[in-house]
Image: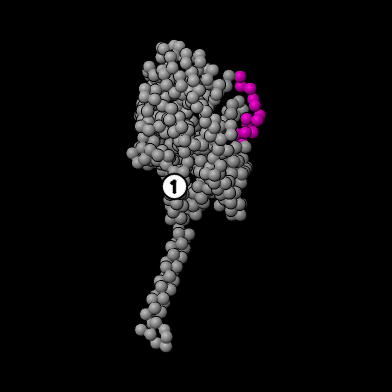
Amino acid sequence: MELFGYNFIHLKYKYYCIIREINFRKELNFMINKLCQNPRVSAYFLILLLAFFALIYNAFLPLHGDEAYYWMWSHDLKTGYYDHPPMVAYFIYLTNFISESEWGVRLSNVFAISISSLYIFKLTSKLSDEKTALNAVIIFLSVLLTHAGYIFTTPDTPLNLFWTLSLYYSYKAIFEGKLRDYVLTGLFLGLMMTSKYSAILFVMSLLLFLLIKRREQFLNPYMYLSIFISLLVIAPMLYWNYQHEWISFLFQIDHGSTSDFYIQPWLILEFFGAQFGVFTPVFTAILFFFLAKDKLYFKDEKLFFIALMTVGILLFFLYKSFYVSMAPNYGAPAYIGGTILLAIIIRNYSLKKTFILGLGVALFFTTIVRIAMITHLPELQRFMYKPQEIVERFATHLKEGDHIYGAHLTTAAYLKYYLPNHPKTDVGIPSRFSYYDMVRDDYYHKDGLLLSRNVKRGDQLKTMYKNVELIDTYEVFKNRTFYTYRVSDPINKSSK
């Protein structure tokens, strides 16, 4: 219908669209305002958003050699392994039902960090309020340490999850006294101790707290029920160690120890300085400063409980760093309680500007590393660079009946993961004792192919085989070359 040259049907539709757009904007603004005004909804939304991002991001990164090694465990489930307790293998076993691709192997990371974030919110809410709890979640999800946890599947994945759950339910058991919380504390303590042996530091800190602040708990039958449940959970892992002459415990004790106790100051600085990197400089400085300065954390027994669970593990690894090199991630569980304390410190001392500065620095570091992992992987983490391409190149030389060897346990694990049908692989050159040595039968020293990152392995192979031929040299990038050897006619045909 037209009047004076105007199409009123078109105008009606045009104004209808404008009105709908206005209504949509109002609805969107209403949702955003509601999201901002409700800390709980905001926290849950942020957790889900980061989980979704991590799922997509992880699909673009190849596995680290250690991840392939733990994935291999998931295809041979046991109640213990030489290197670590078994929980990481169980986690990957469950995610294998969804996908065995890179993002699938790392699915447990996303699950673990999301649940940990949720319980950090819940525990901070109990100690303070929901706005402070939201800040705790924001801090936790912004720092580099958490984002490394999103990517790498290691025993730290279940450790950090069950550390968080143990912290939450032991807090509730001690300060609220319900039977259910004691039962859950026992369960999660057991699961934590079957994740990584450093979980014993949580138990020691918990006992220390009870001795200092809550000695009456030693007369509480619920506490002994909790201990009994924990022992039931870890019994299979303890029995496996007993069957194998405590080999896993002894490895970990030796792995983080030294015989001469020679103090090396640069190692202390290395570990201490690394904390300012993984938890970012501003947040680490605030946390450490107030933990050292503020007596509130001793007077308030609830805050003292959280502080002890933070300081205990950091002091232990700081002490160990006097003598041996400690990886930055060893102290990761400390920052579960540390994050909660930091959010409360920021609220108590009205450090809003400092919080914004710390958050900006954290996001800057995290964003730079996230981008670099995609664009500059060879420089940042060269052991993850093009493993599938390397294995595919190796596979072109395979013949029927070949046995497949890697010169290192992670190389052997990569071969198993990326080769079609995941064939049996082994470490073909004497190396540090590992899972392979525990399961090996008659596979060692047979004709086949070996993949190595070191050309000098050829000389070592000549002491093991009569025929050793370097059949391929593949330079992935500068100073990163792989060598494929064909080996046959072993000099010593007996198994290792």
Q: Tell which of 346 and 141 is nearer to you.
A: 141
Image coords of residue 185 (percent x, y): 40, 37
* Mark 1 lies on residue: 56
Which secondary structure type mostly characterizes the magenta part of the structure? helix
In the image, the segment drawn in magenta is: 260-272
Q: Quadrant of the C terminus?
A: top left
The verdict on residue 262 being magenta is yes
For the view shown, which residue lies furthest in the left direction?
Answer: 97
Please name whichever residue, 81 or 218, is drawn nearer the observer in this view of the structure.
Answer: 81
Residue 231 lies in the magenta stretch = no
Q: Which residue lies at the image location 47% right of the left edge and 38% below the top edge?
A: 62
Local secondary structure at mark 1: helix
Amino acid under disc 1: Ile
Which residue sits furthest right? 265
* Residue 120 image point, x, y percent: 46, 46
Residue 172's image quarter?
Answer: top left
443 versus 90 height, above or below:
above
Residue name at image x 49 percent, y 49 percent: 137
